Image (cartoon, rainbow, N blue to C red):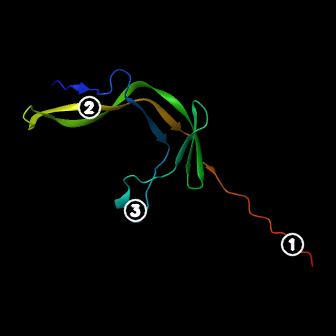
Amino acid sequence: MQIQVQCACGDGGCLEWAIVELQGVVEANSSIQDQIQNFEIGRLCCTSQSAYTFTVGYHELSGKKVPLKKPFLVLKKRKEKLQNGEESSTTALEVVGIIRHRILFKDRPKALISAPQKKEKKAG
């Protein structure tokens, strides 16, 4: 079976994507299970060319950028259109992005707990 893959952006113009690999499980509260699409779970920051931090609530993970042995394509399936505007029975895959790296967080998270504020004694 032959599947045609098209890249509309030309040579080397596809968006670069990355896989974020975490140890453990990321679970959503039962109160927001139905609203998980576009839900922000944390903040990913690049601290240097290959070092990253991922902050989730009061936890900070440190990770690094690791190249994949074989790249992945991110594809979007679509129906081919005929000249008269009708959809044909053949499907095509459109390249949305290329994944060449993963951001690996393999260590335990560091707790971000601020020091308690010191109360000043009033002189009296």
Mark 3 lies on residue: 32
Residue 48 against residue 25 in the figure, above or below: above
Q: Distance between the residues labelled 2 and 1?
A: 68 Å
**Which quadrant is home to the C terminus?**
bottom right
* Residue 95: quarter of image: top left
Could you tell which of marks 2 and 1 lies nearer the N-terminus?
Answer: 2
Q: What element carries label 1?
A: loop
Q: Which residue does the image show at 60% across and 55% down from the upper left?
A: 58
Residue 20 in sight from this viewpoint: yes
* Residue 93: quarter of image: top left
Indicate the amino acid at tag 1.
Lys
Given the current orientation, which residue lies at the most extreme right position?
Answer: 124
Q: Given this view, does label 1 or label 3 mark the residue nearer the observer?
A: 1
Q: Distance between the residues labelled 1 and 3?
A: 45 Å
Mark 2 lies on residue: 94
Residue 89 against residue 10 in the figure, above or below: below
Q: How far apart are marks 3 and 2 (CA)?
A: 32 Å
Mark 1 lies on residue: 121
Indicate the amino acid at tag 2.
Glu
Residue 4 against residue 61 in the figure, above or below: above
**Which quadrant is home to the N terminus?**
top left
Mark 1 surroundings within 10 Å by alpha-carbon count, few (fewer than 14), some (14 through 19), many (20 or more): few
Could you tell which of marks 3 and 2 lies nearer the N-terminus?
Answer: 3
Query: In terms of depth relative to the viewer, which is nearer, 72 or 75?
Result: 75
Q: Which residue does the image show at 42% across and 54% down from the upper left?
A: 39
Question: Left of 79 or right of it: where is 28?
Answer: right
Q: Is mark 3 on a helix, strand or loop?
A: helix
User: Where residue 107 appears, x then y in whole percent?
Assistant: 58, 41
Question: Left of 69 or right of it: where is 105?
Answer: right
